[in-house]
Image: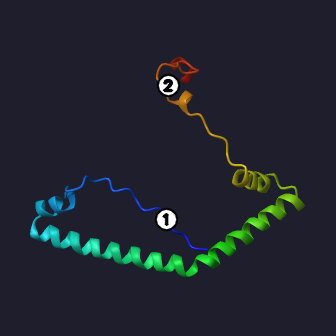
Amino acid sequence: MNFNPKKPVNRFKPGDTPYKDFLAKLSPEERAVHLKKRAERKAMKKVMKELTEEFQEEWAAELHNAAWKVLMKARDKSDPIAFAAIWDRIVGKPKVDDDHLVDPERPLPFKDEDLD
């Protein structure tokens, strides 16, 4: 099992050089600090990618084992929390409609006098 993330869509226009322009605006000291931090981030990203690729099969197996134990707990002990966890992962959670929470025109269900 190999995880291959989708390549990000290039959000910059062809011929546009925002990073070069950003670097040009920095002072020499700021540029050195930025490039050092960038190299550290790239090294960390490379190490994390190698780590995930190395242990990917073990993690997938452990996730499978954990899911199996939760399924057995839901079935054998009739645990409602385990059943809900399995249901959410297999069937999926329902889409929550938050539109009613952010509607500025809808009056509040209480008055300010009720808060005292």
In percent of width and height, residue 21 lies at 15, 59
Q: Residue at x 74, y 72 (%)?
A: 65
Q: Residue 71's quadrant in the figure? A: bottom right
In the picture, the quarter occupied by the C terminus is top right
Which residue, given by chain and number where applicable, does mark 2 sit on?
103
State the residue in front, 22 or 36.
Answer: 22
Q: Is 61 displayed left or right of 18 in the figure?
A: right
Q: Residue at x 72, y 54 (%)?
A: 90
In percent of width and height, residue 111 lies at 54, 18
In percent of width and height, residue 42 lies at 34, 74
Question: Which residue is at the far bottom?
Answer: 54
Which residue, given by chain and number where applicable, does mark 1 sit on?
5
The local crowd at label 1, few if under 14, some if 14 to 19, many if 20 or more residues have their Cα within 10 Å, is: few
Colour option used: rainbow
State the residue in front, 65 or 110.
Answer: 65
Q: Which of pointers 1 and 2 lies earlier in the amino acid sequence?
A: 1
Q: Residue at x 24, y 75 (%)?
A: 36
Q: Is residue 23 above or below residue 51?
A: above
Question: Which residue is at the far right?
Answer: 76
Q: Is 72 displayed left or right of 101 in the figure?
A: right
Please name the amino acid that badge 1 sits on: Pro
Q: Is 30 displayed left or right of 65 in the figure?
A: left
Q: Is residue 60 above or below residue 54?
A: above
Q: Residue 23's quadrant in the figure? A: bottom left
> How many marks do you count on the picture?
2
Q: CA distance from mark 1 to mark 2?
A: 37 Å
Q: Residue at x 68, y 74 (%)?
A: 62
Please name the amino acid that badge 2 sits on: Asp
